[in-house]
Amino acid sequence: MDRITAGFDQLTRFWLETAPARGVVARLDESMVSMLQHHDYPVAVSLLLRQLVGAAALLASNLKQPAQVVLQAQGDGAVPLLCVEATDRLTFRAYANVREDANIAADADLSSLVAPDGNGRFVLTIAPEEGQMYQGIVALHAGSVSSLLADYLTNSQQTQTRLWLRQDGDALEAMLLERLPDSRDEASDSAWEAVVAQAETAFALPFMPFPYSEWLPFVFTGHDVRVHAAQALSFSCSCTVERVLNALRLVGREELQPLIAEQGRVESRCEFCGKRYEVSATQLADLFDHVDASHPPGSGTVH
Ligand SMILES: [Zn+2]
């Protein structure tokens, strides 16, 4: 049995033939270690990044075209930004801005870290490679990542949605259950509540790597559970030297000039994966000469 079939670093979509519900469950193990190994985040920050990655992966599995899901928690606390991206190919990356000298308790929750004054916001963006971007913004309230997201999804999609997360060391498991449109009569209400209770019970237990094709029928005992093929989840950063040069071009020659004069080069570090890029004075000169040639002064904005 390979790692994916065995339940590691994988995502499985499923539906219940005998209840108005469908869902997706994901488990992240070594991919999470790969993501965090380049960083030295406080325990609470690593924990929240893992949870947000788990949630973003579940949402990304619903993308119908090449696109990425971006989840951001923003505020003015000890951690002003947590940013997580997941793509339709089920790759993900994440980073956090942590204020220097911040004293962060291991059990601090999202809102107390990001916005203790209550002025934080949670931003969900769906960015397709082509076409219109969608963005939803809600106030960051106290509570768990799973309750924040479930409330957001229930309100924005008008579909009852529940989300569970559980951790075991570096590993994380996440499950999303969504109520399918149906008659919404009493029998349907109680069927939905019963499967939510079954998921609740399963997520209250410690978890073990197990193929979801075997675990899900066990969780939803009494139901006919249909399971799609498992898909691999992996950490992957899309940074390239071209993107670094683009970013430097936006910073502008004047801003960079003092650095070049002093060090003869500019160093840039990818916030997501920690990779270091070194751009020489010659490369920068080429970059700005090209910009100046194609956009003479007064010709408009440089893209
Ligand atoms: Zn990178």
Image: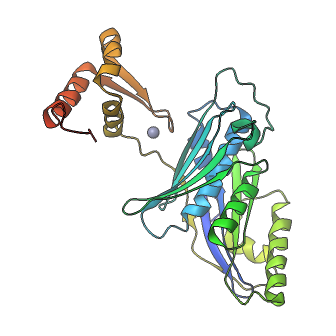
| Residue 47 as seen in the image, left or right of residue 133 | right
**On screen, residue 32 above or below 105:** below
Q: Position of residue 244 (x, y in %)?
A: 36, 34
| Residue 229 as seen in the image, left or right of residue 190 | left
Residue plotted at (69% across, 58% down): 149
* Quadrant for the N terminus in the image: bottom right
The answer to whether any part of residue 29 appears in the image is no
Residue plotted at (63% across, 35% down): 80
| Residue 282 as seen in the image, left or right of residue 162 | left
**On screen, residue 100 above or below 70:** above
The answer to whether any part of residue 47 appears in the image is yes
Q: In the image, ligand 1 is in what quadrant?
A: top left
| Residue 221 as seen in the image, left or right of residue 128 | right
Counting labels gives 0
Residue situated furthest front in the rendering: 298
The quarter of the picture where residue 197 lies is bottom right
